[in-house]
Image (cartoon, rainbow, N blue to C red):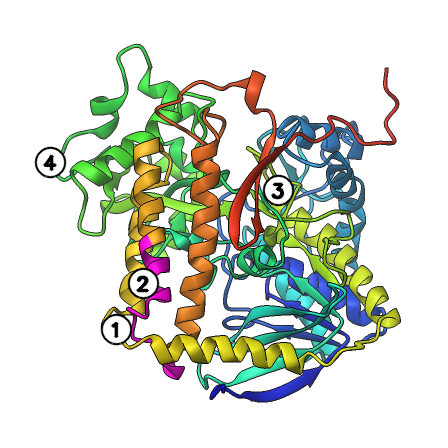
Amino acid sequence: MSYLKIGRIIETDVLVVGGGGAAARAALSSVESGVSVRIAVKSKWLGSGSTATAFSELLAIAAAIGHADERDHPEIHYEDTLDAGRGFIDPELVWTLASEVPDRIQDLRNIGLNFDKEENGKLVQGMSDFATYPRTCRVNGVTARHILVALAKQIKKHNVPIDENIMVFKLLIDKNKSISGALGINRDTKEIILYKTPSIILACGGAHHVYKYGVGTPDMTGNGYAMAYELGIPLINMEFIQIGPGVINPSITLLSGPVWKPKPILTNTKGENILKKHVPPHVKIEDVYNHKVFPFTISTAAYYLDTSIQKELELNPTPNGGVWCTMPDGSEGIVEQKMPKTKGVLKSKGIDVFKDQFEIALVAQCMNGGALIESPDGTTNISGLFIAGETAGGVRGPDRPGGNSLAEGQVFGYRTGKAAAAYADKKEITENPEKESLAVLDDLSELISISKGEKELNDAIHLLKETMYKNCLVIRNDKRLNVALTLIDELERSIVNGDFNIDENNLFTAIDLKHMLVTSRAIVISAKTRTESRSCHYREDYPEKDDLNWINSIYVTQIDGEMQINTRQWPKTRKSEVQL
């Protein structure tokens, strides 16, 4: 008999899980379609996740609108994106992204977003990695935040309810494998909420906070991936994670490509220049700096900067587990030219880049993988479940061209919102989800009843983050990955055996840990399976790229309670393209 009870039942046509750019765009599209919409955010609306907090010197949204160069158009954006991941990503999704983002840019302008403009009125567009022409549009250096705020104002006009501090943790399905609802838990009050809805959009971000250091806020722990996986939806390309240097104290600040143009000096606690220590004689350190972009890649000499940092994190770490960074004498001019926004942000945090040495380390920024979507509308193999944004998999492979992340959120957020609304408008819940809810609560009650051990959940989360950081960062090998996998096994056994101290007051944390373990296992197993090095995935025991065997995606699926591995190579072109 369960002693956990449903505190509230909320009915809505569409439930949007998440609070970032994709979630906001999805919610707006749904409510504009005439259905009732509700948003559930794990933390604070407009104050959590990646979109609300993202910053880099180059942060922008990519759209082939041809303002900077009239030769740019969606077909070229499509080819540029496909070239960065051909064989690993769905061409149909890529075409949707490239062909529709100009319309989504116009949508944002129509609701009052003022993109940076030239004197002639055209939008300022910048170059990004993998782009043939300049196509990234920006807003005063904090583009993501401005997009989210503009969408939030429209959502407020439609009186969409927003449930803050609610972690949706279980998706409910009926006997026909259709969505019937979801369960959530309030971080503060511990109240359990049953959402009765036929249509759910998962747009709850990534999982970079399964690592010790990540951008955004700590609530991004892979809940969306774990919930999708539990329903049998494949997780694809999970080994490809964007990781690179960032300031780690007093808070995380990502250091993008322009920051390395002044050639900042990196030293360990012994005062040794780590690049002079680790870069081999045949490689010019100047080339390491000149090629450095965010994130880590094996493709250029910049590889040595990230790997040198990781080696020193393990040999001679600074107090917070990083290396020291200082700007060289006489770099004032290039700092002002190349990284003025970063300099200003660090100044606001008490760091004077011209006078202070500051700690940097490697930070996780974005998951290139995700839960596999089956169409441009974000549909899945579960009727009524739609996925968008960083939670979705299939449009990002080994590399993600700059500016595409925000573009994906707007394009697929818009599409999933419309599709979820259309589905909800026709679908009626024929089964009461309360029965399945009670079964879930029975299982959680049983977990609490057996969990009388002395292990603390927060200690386990800290250990998991540290272990993933040490063993599944930018330097990977079979031994390291096995260490991570062994810990994941041990923590999962500890939960099953009741070794933790779990009660109603920390149930939120217990569920979060279980989701982190599912997501971490998917990352580690995918990294173990890919026995080659490619882009952001580096195996020092398999240092070469293997195009003969590995131009395909790895995906993991739950079958009979076990995580199974499969591979898939995507078509190299979309169906409508004429084959020459």
**Mark 4 lies on residue:** 270
Work out whether mark 4 precedes mark 3 in sequence or the reverse, and give the earlier one.
Answer: 4
**Mark 1 lies on residue:** 453
Name the image quarter holding residue 209.
bottom left
Task: Name the element at disc 2.
Answer: helix
The amino acid pointed to by label 2 is: Ser
Work out whether mark 2 precedes mark 1 in sequence or the reverse, and give the earlier one.
Answer: 1
Instruction: Name the mark nearer the viewer: 3 or 2.
Output: 2
The amino acid pointed to by label 1 is: Gly
Task: Name the element at disc 3.
Answer: loop
Q: Residue at x 64, y 52 (%)?
A: 233
Mark 3 in CB contact with mark 2 (< 8 angstroms): no
Instruction: Name the mark nearer the viewer: 1 or 4.
Output: 1
Work out whether mark 3 precedes mark 2 in sequence or the reverse, and give the earlier one.
Answer: 3
The answer to whether residue 434 is left or right of residue 526 is: right
Viewer can see residue 147: no
**Mark 3 lies on residue:** 403
